[in-house]
Image (cartoon, rainbow, N blue to C red):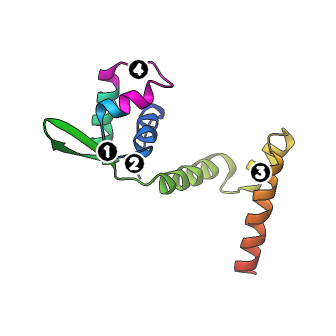
Amino acid sequence: MTEISKAEFDVLNALWEGYPASANDIIERLNKQKDWHDKTVKTLLSRLVKKQAIKFESQDRRYWYSPLIERESYVVHESKSLISRLFEGRVAPLVAGFARDDSLSRQDINELKALIEKWEKDNG
């Protein structure tokens, strides 16, 4: 999977909200959180097209963009990359760090327990 910058990810994330979408649709979504110039967003869209992360179709003199990468597969890829780079491929030190900092909510803990129980059932 190709490397995507933070700014490119923000654009891709706005596109995942609903597509196909015009550049103006994406700009409008992004302007709720960022104060980016229209040209900046259009440049980022062009980069994402070149990286084959998104595609476009021309219709009535407008470009309609759609993602070529699914959000879930991108998140899984980036998560594995982070864990590999920072934690030698081990998840436990990452979770332990959050636990030590009291960053885990009760809901997080319950979800982790459920995931572990499911894994044990499926792989036991």
Q: Secondary structure at mark 4?
A: loop
SS under mark 1: loop
Is tag 3's residue or tag 4's residue first in the polypeptide sequence? 4
First reached walking from the N terminus: tag 4 or tag 2: 2
> At label 2, which amino acid type do we have?
Thr
Q: Secondary structure at mark 3?
A: helix
The residue labelled by disc 4 is: 36
Q: Is residue 96 above or below residue 37?
A: below
Q: Residues within 10 Å of mark 3 (few under 14, many from 20)?
A: few
In this view, the mark in front (4 or 1):
4
Gap in Å between the C-alphas at discs 2 and 3? 30 Å
Provide the residue span drawn in magenta.
Answer: 26-40
Q: Are marks 3 and 4 in contact (CB under 8 Å)?
A: no
Three-letter amino acid code at the position of disc 3:
Asp
Query: What residue sits right under mark 2 in the picture?
Result: 2
Callout in the foreground (3, 1): 3
Q: Which mark is residue 108?
A: 3
Rendered residue at 48%/25% (across/down)? 32
Residue 51 disc label = 1
